[in-house]
Image (cartoon, rainbow, N blue to C red):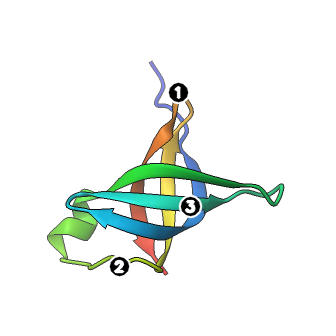
Amino acid sequence: MAKEVKIKVEGKVLSVNHDFYTVELSLPNDKKATISAHVSGKMRMNIIRILPGDNVVVEMSPTDLNHGLITYRK
């Protein structure tokens, strides 16, 4: 089977709850959506801190659009 194509979206971190983050996504049609996300393994290994207000890139699976993976902090 082929791998799923991930959806990459930019967003802003609203709050931090231990290992989960609430991220407000900025969608192309000027609408806002909030999802829960956690940090990718490479960001954890390199101890990259994410604070509320940071702009991040989130990868989401097309099957579950309520959860994401933070892969990059801007």
Sequence-earlier tag: 2 or 1: 2
In the rendered image, which residue does mark 3 sit on?
24
- Residue contact at pointers 3 and 2, CB within 8 angstroms: no
- Find residue 15 and report its image quarter: bottom left
Q: Residue at x 48, y 25 (%)?
A: 2
Please provide percent x and percent y for residue 30. Answer: 81, 60
Q: Kindly report the distance in space between the C-alpha atoms of the residues bearing marks 2 and 1.
A: 28 Å
Residue 39 shows in the view:
no
Q: Is residue 29 left or right of residue 7?
A: right
The CA distance from mark 3 to mark 2 is: 13 Å
Residue type for callout 3: Glu
Q: Is residue 32 left or right of residue 66?
A: right
Which marked residue is nearer to the observer: mark 2 or mark 1? Answer: 2
Q: CA distance from mark 1 to mark 3?
A: 19 Å
Tell me residue 51's x, y (percent): 35, 79
Q: Position of residue 71 (x, y in %)?
A: 40, 63
Residue 65's place in the image compared with 19, above or below, is above
Disc 2: which residue:
51
How crowded pointer 3 is (Cα within 10 Å; few <14, some 14-19, many 20+) is rated as some
| Mark nearer the viewer, 1 or 3 | 3
- Residue 47 seen from this side: yes
Q: Residues within 10 Å of mark 2 (few under 14, many from 20)?
A: some
Of the numbered discs 1 and 3, the one sitting upstream in the chain is 3
Q: Nearer the viewer, residue 40 or 15?
A: 15
Q: Could you say where residue 20 lies in the image, as x and y percent from the top left? A: 29, 55
**Quarter of the image holding residue 10?**
bottom right
Q: Amino acid at mark 2?
A: Leu
What residue does disc 1 label?
Answer: 63
Vertical placement of residue 68 versus 70, above or below:
above
Residue 24 vertical placement versus 67 (above, below): below
Q: Amino acid at mark 1?
A: Thr
Number of numbered markers:
3
